[in-house]
Image (tube, helix red, strand yellow):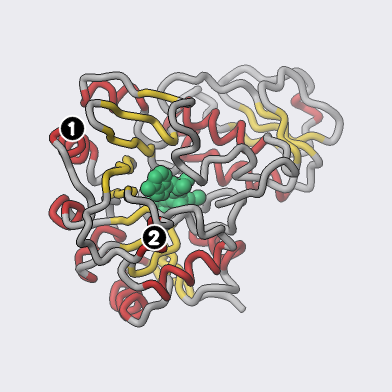
Amino acid sequence: MKAEILPASEAMERALALLRAGEVVAIPTETVYGLAGDATNGLAVAKIFEAKGRPRFNPLIAHVASLEMAQRVGRFDPLSRKLAETFWPGPLTLVLPLQPDTDIHPLVTAGLDTIALRMPRGFGAALIGRLGRPLAAPSANSSGRISPTSAQAVQSDLGGKIRLIVDAGSTAVGLESTIVKVGQDSLRLLRPGGVPASEIEAAAGMPLERGGGDGIQAPGMMASHYAPGAAVRLNARSVGKGEALLAFGPDRAKGWEEAVAMRNLSPAGDLREAAANLFSFLRELDDSGASSIAVEPVPVDGLGEAINDRLTRAAAPRDKLPAPD
Ligand code: TXA
Ligand code: MG
């Protein structure tokens, strides 16, 4: 069975009706498509976990339509307010202390005393505004698969499990949001994403802490993740027999003419363009039937940090850890 796909311009009332009835709906955001449900409705949130096959210890992001809605759910201090004012709506998620008297269902936070909050752009924000409540929404992919950047990608992965996909075309950013945990006088980068770390540091006037610290803070960030079916080989300077090539920039890896299939993330070497193309090109090369995808080096500055993070996860051994997300 397939889900119904409606263009965003026609989908508002139908999406609202389904969400009010406790159903889940796949919606576009500027980062990736999300699988959304009413964050105050435990049954709706349970349906999200079920459709994705996601372990329940892995908390969800609550999406809001305004800073006011966010403040009813999370406790903002001057630093988190500054970041929200600078980057919202947009691809930044803030992990903040959970308000004690919130009606967010505890399944959303997996029982933690913190909550991940983000204000998306476009259809999602309008939908949440109309609903008047936050939407819990992880990326609309089966746990462990590549995040969808088009309605068709959602259909081919989750189409049999959900009723409606709202279609707004390809997502503009193409990578998930950057996740930052705000502590007392500290900021920790939990996941690089659509806002480059350097922009957050500039706005905050302080450096982001990375890695180590007090253990796994974004439970979904385990090594094996975003896994295509084909093996993924990073920093390739040459193409092996039977391999597909994920290229970047103007210079080609040796033997590229023999590649089973090739996509170039950005012929001009533009990281923004590369981010927007990353997940759909990985899917396309995976579908080419190649046993392995060779990936040319991508610089690590700016958005390149998040691109390399996702590529590293795509290349990680699959049997080591359960893919949680
Ligand atoms: O761009 C995005 O962020 C997309 C769109 C749909 O908004 N959403 C997304 O959600 O990527 P998801 O569930 O695939 O990833 C959310 C990540 C997970 O790694 C989860 O563990 C982490 O956020 N997370 C959620 N709540 C958390 C919390 N309270 N503390 C730490 N990490 C948290
Ligand atoms: Mg995800």
Q: Which of 155 and 75 is in front in this view?
A: 75
Tell me: is circle 2 under 8 Å from ligand 1.
yes
* Residue positioned 20% across, 37% down in the render: 80
Question: Vertically, is 199 above or below 63?
Answer: above
Query: Residue 127, percent across and down?
Result: 27, 66
**Counting other residues with Cα less than 10 Å from the Cα at mark 1, is it few (<14), some (14-19), or many (20 or more)?**
some
Question: Vertically, is 244 above or below 23?
Answer: above
Residue 79 circle label: 1
Helix or strand or loop: what does disc 2 sit on? helix
Lateral position of residue 277 relative to residue 118, left or right: right
Q: Answer with the quarter of the image where residue 22 lies.
A: bottom left
Lateral position of residue 44 relative to residue 284, left or right: left
Q: Is any atom of residue 31 visible in this view?
A: no
* Residue positioned 31% across, 19% down in the render: 207
Amino acid of disc 1: Leu
* Residue positioned 42% across, 31% down in the render: 272
Query: Residue 210, percent across and down?
Result: 42, 24
Q: Nearer the viewer, residue 99 or 189?
A: 99
Q: Which of 237 and 129 is in front in this view?
A: 129
Q: Is any atom of residue 243 visible in this view?
A: yes
Helix or strand or loop: what does disc 1 sit on? helix
Residue 108 circle label: 2
Query: Residue 189, percent across and down?
Result: 39, 31
